[in-house]
Image (cartoon, grey):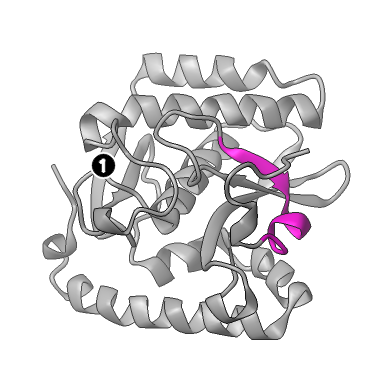
Amino acid sequence: MVVQRDSQKHMYFLKKKMMVTSRALLIAIGAIGLSACMSQINLSPSSWYEQMGALENSGDTLYICHGFGCQYLSPVTFSKHDKVTLRAILLRGSDSSRAERAAISRAVQWQERRVGPIVGSSNDIGGLDMKSGNVWGQMDCIDEATNTAGLLIYASSQGWLKYHRVTRPASRGYFFDGKYPHASAVIVDTTTDIAWVVDSWRLSNGEPPDILHMSKWLKMTSSDLEAPDVR
């Protein structure tokens, strides 16, 4: 089953309005500065799903965004085996917050490989590829941020995250300020209260996400795209 705008017919038109709203948000973010950008994560994750026209998790089912801007939504339900696998991946990070971030990286890679054959995203091209807009199975940063956030929210709901809480995804930049418009999932280290982005957009499907301080990520420009320092 594929959930698209025709599953809730009014959502198609709402989606168009939300795309305009999203652009306006990015312009505002570029104008109001770093502190306001950081405040995004204080909002409920639900507000992101509402804004993007996406669907939140339902039990063991995650709704995977693809086609750019959550144009398509495909449900993927984790089996008992999936849950055992995901839990084992994350438990490998139980020694420290740093170890848990490494485990989160592996979990994101696992999810992308897991959903790829179902969604058609196994060959998703990383980075900025404007030719892939509205293409089934291809993902932009909105899709990636939503899907990664969904996985992390699911893991948190299962009690599998020991050192991090999941927040609303964050957005940054607009072309006039030298920063490309972009979005990413965000976690906060509960031992330090430092926010980290988990950005799965830059590389292709199943590759490690960039995990770095949100404060640093917010300052990145297009020249940082090739190989960002993720330390």
The image shows residue 76 at horizontal and vertical percentages of 29, 35
Q: Position of residue 196 (x, y in %)?
A: 71, 48
Magenta part of the protein: which range?
Answer: 209-220
> Which one is in front, 6 or 231?
231
Does residue 1 appear to the left or right of 226 in the view shown?
left
Q: Dividing the picture into quarters, in which one does residue 219 lie?
A: bottom right
Q: Is residue 187 magenta?
A: no
> Residue drawn 73% across and 31% down?
162
Q: Looking at the image, which is closer to me, 36 or 42?
A: 36
Q: Residue at x 62, y 73 (%)?
A: 178
Q: Which amino acid type corresponds to the residue marked 1 in the rendered image?
A: Pro
What is the quadrant of the C terminus in the image? top right
Residue marked by disc 1 = 75
Is 207 situated above or below 178?
above
Position of residue 170 relative to residue 123, above or below, is below
Residue visible at 32% across and 59% down in the picture = 130
Position of residue 226 measured from the top left corner of the image (x, y, whole percent)? 58, 45
- What is the crowding at mark 1: few (fewer than 14 residues within 10 Å), some, or many (at least 20)? many
Q: Position of residue 165 (x, y in %)?
A: 69, 45
Is 208 placed left or right of 83 in the picture? right
Dividing the image into 4 quarters, which one contains the N terminus? Answer: top left
Give the secondary structure at mark 1.
strand
| Above-or-below relation of 31 to 92 | below
Of all residues, the one furthest to the right in this rendering is 192
Q: Is residue 92 above or below residue 227?
A: above
> Going by the image, does 225 lie left or right of 193?
left
Residue at 55 percent of width and 54 percent of height: 184
Q: How many marks?
A: 1
